[in-house]
Image (cartoon, helix red, strand yellow):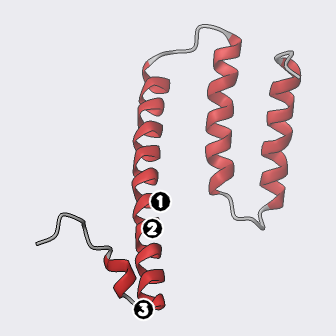
Amino acid sequence: MTETPIDLDKHRGMAAQKATDIRRVLADVEANAKQLREAQSLVEIQLLAVPATSWPEAVAKARYVLNLYSASLAPTDTHHRDLVAAVLADLTRLSGES
């Protein structure tokens, strides 16, 4: 037995190496997506549990919900996308943000 690990990728064909690389990338993406869903869940629990104490906090909550809604819209649903964009612009303008 040797002390140096054997790089098995060198013994595979190019197609097998590419397939392995794709599986590794997909596994990383899935792990990151799971972490993102968990973080999003924690944020949403906090948004539900703690009432807004100021208009800026209420605006932040409204933005979050509108962005969630917008993300679920079909790309062809331009009417609702425009409506969400207009409301977000109103919130920005009325909150004094640039």
Mark 3 surroundings within 10 Å by alpha-carbon count, few (fewer than 14), some (14 through 19), many (20 or more): few
Q: Secondary structure at mark 1?
A: helix
Image coords of residue 93 (percent x, y): 89, 23
Instruction: Tell me whether the residue at label 3 lies in contact with that at label 1, contact meaning CB atoms closer than 8 angstroms.
Output: no
Foreground disc of the pair 2, 3: 3
- Residue bearing the label numbered 2: 26
- Residue bearing the label numbered 1: 29
Q: Which residue is found at the position 67% from the left and 42% from the top?
A: 67
Q: Which residue is found at the position 86% from the left and 40% from the top?
A: 86
Lower position in the chain sequence, tag 2 or tag 3: 3
Answer with the quarter of the image where residue 23 lies. bottom left
Q: Secondary structure at mark 3?
A: loop
Q: Which residue is found at the position 79% from the left and 52% from the top?
A: 81
- Residue bearing the label numbered 3: 13
Give the amino acid type for the residue marked by disc 3 in the picture.
Answer: Gly
Locate the C terminus by quadrant.
top right
